[in-house]
Structures are given as structure tokens and as C-alpha cells.
Amino acid sequence: MQKSILVTGGAGYIGSHAVLALKDNGWNPVVIDNLVTGFRGAVPQDVPFVEGNIADHDLVSATIKKYNIIAAMHFAGSVVVPESVSDPLKYYYNNTANTRSLLESIIKNEVRHFIFSSTAATYGIPETTPVHEDMPKIPINPYGTSKLMTEYMLADVAAAHDFNYCALRYFNVAGADPKGRTGQSTAGATHLIKVAVEAALGKRDSISIFGTDYDTEDGTGVRDYIHVSDLAAAHVIALEKLIDSPEDSHILNCGYGHGFSVTQVLDAVDRVTNNKLVRNLEPRRAGDPDALISDNSKIKQRFGWTPQYDDLNLIVKHALAWEQRLIENPIA
């Protein structure tokens, strides 16, 4: 019987790219998604799809047994930072309680390997940048806290069971599949590059710059933008490492190790589109650090991960192409 990889949230933005990366590398993904924010059309027709909740023990157990699941990639959850502040219980339910339920099903069914979609938000506002994995984790919003709580759970589960894991702390994920197979499709998304290409194509009248008084070269916030396909590739490498070395677990940053300011990103969108975005200057948002850049030396050393799309113009180009595709042929 073929061995398969469970992908929770595989109909979402990052999860759907991970599904493609698994397929492209000869693995057999199986998706569970409740389609609250995901899209059935983001999952290839030849990939088994189960609609449902990851906290449903019977559903998850049946899926594991039916498809001979040997590992899981966990993307299902809520990701909007301001919403986590206004509705914290939603985040502790979706991101923490549901993951606890999923892990119970995983352990009971003897799935040995787990890759977790974590976040740089676990660091909060770091005192220095680039940020390395051993720096204090002091999240400043329920989103970051809910993810950090899951990291603690994973460490405890690995200590108690025959189980290993990799938690990848994402920085700012952007772009879309270079072949145009999937991309960021969620309405009302808050990612800067997604919002900017929407504005470039007339889906928005303008774009807001929140704060021009940061301690950066041009006064706008600097972030580490990583192409979603490079991030998906990191998950496949993590899977292979967990299987090859079942005694080892990992918590690793996933970014490029350098950053761009908001102004630089918007300038890149102007270049790629040969147009000029209408920019509104707004007050800075509470809790936004001046700069947030990864120290990615560990993932490069341990996994031999080598980004293929470390080019801001290319990231924008791929995001723009996907946004144009959504206008012509909306995903469902």
C-alpha cells in the first residue's frame, strides 16, 4: 500500500503549495480541509481530498488508516494578527485546541513525523535583528502565542512518544506558484504584496503605508519576504530529514535573511506593473517592529535548503500573475 503524507489545510495558501511540492517530489499528499478559508479548486483533482475538521478524531483516524499516512504537515489554522487580538478565543481554539486534538489522533494512530506551520510572531518584538531561533519568545498577540503553545506541545509529545517534529517559523510569505497552479486567493488578505498587486490591478483604490517614522533607511518597516514555493520546498526537505533521522526534531526560521521596506516593496510593484500605486500615509500600527529579518543559517546548515526565488521582482511578478488569473478565472 502506498505511503502518504497528510496535509491539513491543504486547500489554503501555503498548504496548497506544499501539496504541489510533495507531488513534484514523488510523495503522495492527502488533504484534510474544512474549506472555511481554503478552496477545493486549489487541490489537484488527483490528490485525495477529505472535507472536515482536524479535531474530528474519527475522521482523522479513518483518513490515516485509509491512506496509510506516515507523516503530517499541519497548516490548518487562523492567521490574521489583528483578528487574533479582537477574537483571541477563536485563535486558541483553531490554532491550539484543535492542534492538540489533531496530535492525539496522530499519536493514537502511530504517525511518527510532524511538520508544523509556525511563525516569526512567536518572537514578538525582538531586541535585535536578524532573529535567531534561541532568542526570547515573547509574542505580543494571541496569534503568536497560540503558535508558541503548539511548539511547547510538540516538544512534550516528542519527549513522551516515538515521534519527531519540525516547526518552521515563517517570516513574510509572498508570491505564488511559478507555474500558476495556485496562489493566495483569500478575500480580504492582509499580506502587503497581495494587497499591493490587488491595488495595481484595480481591485483596491489605493494602498496604505502604516508608519513612516521607523528606525529604517526610508522610515517604513522592513520585513523578510520569502517566496511561498521556497517555503513549500523547505517542508519537503524537513519531511525527508525527519524520516531519515527519527531521533531528531527541529525548530527553524524560514526566511531569506535579508529584508525590504514597505516603500521598497511598493516600488517593486510599480516597476513590475509599469504603473504607480496610490499610496496613503497612515499612523503606525501598535506592535509593529522597525525590522524583522530571519537568521536562516540553521535551516541552510541542517537541511541544505537553498532558495530558488530570492528576488523581490520575481516574487511580485508571480503574485501579480496569480492575481490576474483570479480576475479571469476565480477559484472555487
Image (cartoon, grey):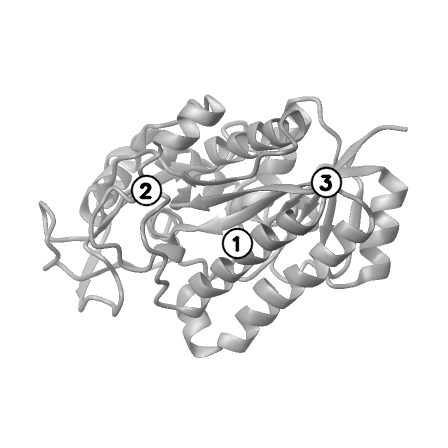
Real-space Cα distance between discs 1 and 3? 16 Å
Q: Split into 4 quadrants, where in the image is the N terminus?
A: top right
Quadrant in which residue 189 is drawn: bottom left
Q: Which residue is mark 3?
A: 112
In the rendered view, tell whether residue 148 sits above or below residue 269: below
Real-space Cα distance between discs 1 and 2? 16 Å
Quadrant in which residue 123 is drawn: bottom left
Which of 57/274 is in front?
Answer: 57
Give, as a three-letter code, the residue at label 2: His
- Camera sees residue 307: no
Q: Is residue 329 left or right of residue 277?
A: right
Which of 12/74 is in front?
Answer: 74
Nearest to N terminus: mark 3 or mark 2: 3
Tag of residue 151: 1
Give, as a three-letter code, the residue at label 1: Glu
Specify few, some or many for label 3: CA neighbours under 10 Å numbering under 14, 14-19, or 20 or more: many
Q: Which residue is mark 2?
A: 132
Quadrant in which residue 66 is drawn: top right
Query: Residue 64: image x %, image y %?
Result: 83, 45
Taking the view exactly as shown, the residue that stands out farthest to the front is: 160
Real-space Cα distance between discs 3 and 2? 27 Å
